[in-house]
Image (cartoon, coloured by chain):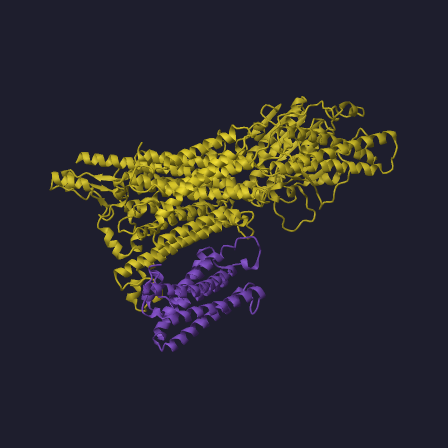
Chain colours: A purple, B yellow
Amino acid sequence: MAAYEYGKAASHRSTIKITSALCALWCTCLSAIILLSVKYKFPFDIIAQPVTGVQIVAGIIFTVHTLSLAVSSALEKDYFRIKPKNVFKCVIAVVCACIVFHVLAILFGAPALESSRETFHFAMLLTCVAVLPACCVLGADGEKWIAVYVQSRPELGKETVIYITTITSVVGAWLGAVPIPLDWDRPWQVWPVSCVLGSLFGYCLGLLFSAMYLPLKHRQLSKTKLT
Amino acid sequence: MGVGSKVVFLFLFLASAYVVGLLIFTKGFLLARTMIHQNSSCEVEFATRSSDLAHGGHRGCWTHARFKRAIIIIVDALRYDFLFYNVSLQSDPPPYINKLKTIHALLNRHPKNARLYKFLADPPTTTLQRLKGLTTGSLPTFVDAGANFDSSEITEDNWVDQLVNQGKDIKFLGDNTWDSLFPNRFYKSFPFPSFNVKDLHTVDNGILKHLYPELRRRDWDVFIAHFLGVDHCGHRFGPNHPAMADKLDQMDRMIRNVTSQMKDDTVLFVFGDHGMTRTGDHGGDSEDELTAGLFVYSPAQITASSPPPQDKPQVIQQTDLVPTLSLLLGLPIPFSNLGMVIPDLFNHCPWWDTQHNEIRQVFHTIKALHLNALQVSQYITSYAKVSSDFPQDKFRSLQASLQRSEKELEALITSVATGSGSHGLLDRFFNLQDQYQEYLSQVRAMCQGVWAKFDLTAISLGIVMILGGVMVNIILATCWTGDGEQFPGYFPFMIGGMILQVVYYVLHVTVFPPSVPSVMGFVIGLVLVYALAIVLKKRIDEVSKEMTLSQWADCGVAALVMFMCFAAFFSNSFVVYEDAVVHFLAQSLLWYTAIRVMINSTQSSSSHSKDIAGRASKKSKPSFVHLSELLTSPAITTFFIASFCSLMLRFSIYFRACREEQQDCELSSFLQPLSSFGEDASGYKNQRYFFSIGCLFGTLWLIRKWLQHYGNLNGDGINVLCTKFVLPLGGIACALYWAVQALPPKELDALPPWQQTNMAQIVYICVAAHILTTLLQPLHVYILDSSPSNTVNVPLMNRGPEHAVPYVYKQLQQHWNKKNESETPPAAYGLGSVYSSSLVAFAASLFLLLGLLLSDGLAPSLALAVLVLFVFMELTSAFCIGATSNSGVPQGPVPWIPIITHGLLSSTFFYATGHHATIPAIRFEAAFTGFHGDFSTNIIPALLITLNTFAAPIFFAVVSPLLLFWPQLRGPLNQWMTSAGARGRESAEWKGDFSLYDNGVLLRKNLFCSCCRMLLFHAVKVLGAACAAALHRRHLMVWKIFAPRFVFEAANLIIVSAVLLVMMLLVLRVDHAVSKLTKTLQKTS
């Protein structure tokens, strides 16, 4: 991907390493929770009660992201992003994304009126994994959003991670719809369980991939810089 | 040879290669059984006719005739639960329950004179197939299922022929299918047309008029009456309709009258040839369709055994009627019969004192079974001689078991004669009876297994052929680019190889004896595929060097979706829910396109000016100025346009039909004809009627508006006038026709036939006139002559300049300027959309025709399709313009993403026009739009049904060349979606699709490439369906799911390729006319 352009901040090796390690850690925790829930129905049963499950998982993801945002801005002594105006913008963005995902799910064939509770929770989860992290990292700065999502030029670091995880979680949710028509009569084939699981797995895979991709890419870049 | 004819021939060649592949595959997959044209004769060694005469009875062939006469009454689609009398009746029964009271009374009053059976049909449950089974006793094969409308004479041995040979007289009344199956066999016949399923009464009343007098005359030996009213009532209203109760009451009265007139030497069979589904259709193999009922009655005693309990009815096969009837009447059993006599009906013989002697009862049954078994044995022995179908060991073990039974029978006869060993004799007899029955049912099972056996060679050759076609198609669709008129060097080899393959395969399948090994065929096919793969690899390597990331993504997504379409055929669940699957994929690609357009426009606008930001919902500022700017930014506009398109597509779900396997599906009310709603739903009726009319006229108005926008409706050319006036006239006629059809059935039937149909015929005439004028004079262009007198009064058009888009022909202008500086050049109205307008006009008339055929309920779905297509075209052209890197208009053929989306939309609307890939889902009633039912040929109904079934694929194939022209037009939506920068660049010189005229060779090549790509999508789907059918040929559901899917997909491919060919010719015709026009323009200047 020759399209990448790198700013000054990206080149810190330690930052990359920390981001990568945090990604791996977060991926491990989240996938452990999901696997526990799928396999042993503990601490909650996401298959039998997708609504509660989604509420808990979305809650965890939300807390982790806001906490990490708070911690990182505290560390960087950089409070400008947490201005009320910017927060308000981000909240509007998240709400809009949630509505858009809900409508999209219906347009793609989810039942229009019945089980709208489930559909909404699915949309909420997808927002949590695909849009919320981006809000935390990019804030309300439209230029940055365009640079990352439209021009596909994320800075190496957090922005790469959210770029990758957004794509993988949306694709995961899309692929999650594939097994729904099959006649296996499994409980996880019921709408929206497979799509919820798909987006979560997509998110985890994206995290894993970016944890591996970041150091590799960084090494490659620093080599090309030296030569 | 010009490029035009080259292109047409190449396409024709490709399509015919596919058709050959499909035919070869079909030949192997839908196997027909080998027919043995041999008839049973009266003198056979295993039956000694003299011995039976000793104790009286009527003279017979293999055995004595138990009855002298038989009455056979077929009530089409008489399901078992129509016949069965439910004593424990619930409070609110469906209208078909407990209507045949006579039968119940007879069963109760004379338990030994009457019997009721469940009468299992062998699928397919179409009347023609059933009649074949019911007279010859053989098993059907899938391949004749389609031949229901082309019934031809039965050539296998059957009991009708046997009766004629024995000099018996048959009298026949009813369904004229019998007359075409058995021409000149009947001593007297009263056939009535069977095809008009709307007509509930003509056939039945006709039969009833002649039935009693003819019965009373007693100049017949066998009397056959075939009633159709119940079946037609099912087709028209379904079983749950009061009309069904009336019909069954009528049948009940008929049975009562017939039974009261019967004498002791007569036996009566009343049965249905198949059942019906909940919706009243038949043809498939669901339980409701298979379980017909059989009622046997005679005033004389016919059985010695007591009736079975009510809740456990005896189940027999429909083929069992053949030997039973034959032996009861003393006929030889037809040669190829596989049925088993009904044991109950042979355990009583009035001349042999079976009344109180159980051994005699069993022995009498065994005699019948013995004859039956020997006949079946003779048949399978001679079948094994002509064909090696039967597994040898199974065949031998069956014959050996028959030998054992025969020996046992001899031993038993001697022991009865000598009177020795009477102890346990009865058990031995019963045992023997079981052995015979076991033998007969095992033979039947073996034959059933074998005749579902496939010709694997033909199947694989067919698949290899289609695969070769797909490879050639890919190469044709990708490798012949650029300006040159010449083919690449390997083209002759490729086409030569393909011709060789086609010729060899055809010879192999038709001419060569089966002993020729098929290795050669595979070698040719696979070598060809391999060579083409190498060529393709090289081409891909070439192209991939210069591809950008987004192009890679496009190719990847296109390939992924294509693969998913292909792979979905391999799972029965995906085939069952294919309507949802294709809808999902179509939505996905639609949104992919939209996102690409959004990204493109944001990129260009953000590079254009830093202020306007895309992705704006995330960045919304409360200030209103900013917000409005944001909402009109191209990305957001695109988002809303895509949402609209997507929403329209989502609405199409409500027009889907329900497949039998889709359990949680509710029947959409759009699929029920308006006339089926009662008085209480008149409000709904009106709403729906006006909704349909609104959709029809709204769409016609939209098309008209579009043509007006591009200035194509100016002037007084005959085609313009036709588009202006004939089409709306057709629309009005269509609306009136729907209104007439919405009348309650009774009032509708009271109208004279011409009044019922004339409105639809007016629509046909309008459509034909419009298509004809479009073909004769394809250009919707008006040249404003600029002779000095005309240039003075300029406002000849009453439309403003923005309505009539004047195009100044460049060369002409220069020419003119040289000659006469002062005069203005001639202006041509509508030249900017000269290609598109002809296609749109053509599509408009087709819309009217298909809308009429789809009937009022489903026409809105087609209107929805038009709307979706319009927005999709705009979206796609924005996509195409974005995809071309240089600033100009797109030059190449249509990219893959739009092609695949278009194909998926076509599949989505196939389902959204109330169809499914199953035979019962075919809407046969379409054959009666505009015709009253008495067809002299089968061509018209077949054509109308095909048009109805494949309405969406045909319509989408017709509009597909527009994908090529649309990006040139710069439609209004398209301009909103592209950024201001791009807009400014383009508006300077708008030439519309006329710019394509400049390079005729490129136009033809691009057209060809695009059509090839379109065909490729369908061909890959056919390949998937064929592979899945071949792979799952032993699957439980193969005849229910995979085989019909393949048949529909194959028909779809053939139809689409034909339509695409026609559209290519049409575009060439338009191009020809355009070049003529420019020549005359040059001359006049």
Quadrant location, the C terminus of chain A: bottom left
> Where in the figure is residue B769, as x and y percent of width and height?
35, 35
> Where in the figure is residue A60, as x and y percent of width and height?
48, 71
Quadrant location, the N terminus of chain A: bottom left
- Left/right placement of residue B669 relative to residue B797 reads right
- Left/right placement of residue A137 relative to residue B99 reads left
Count up the numbered dots: 0
Quarter where residue B177 is shown: top right
Q: Is residue A219 above or below residue B406?
A: below
> Where in the figure is residue B588, as x and y percent of width and height?
42, 54
> Where in the figure is residue B721, as x and y percent of width and height?
30, 38
**Residue B751 visible, this orientation:** no
- Left/right placement of residue B664 relative to residue B1083 reads right
Q: Is residue B280 above or below residue B55?
A: below
Q: Is residue A132 above or below residue B305?
A: below
- The residue nearer to you, when weighing B879 against B126, is B879
- Left/right placement of residue B151 relative to residue B610 reads right
Q: Residue furthest front?
A: A227
Quarter where residue B322 is shown: top right
**Residue B726 visible, this orientation:** yes
Quarter where residue B367 is shown: top right
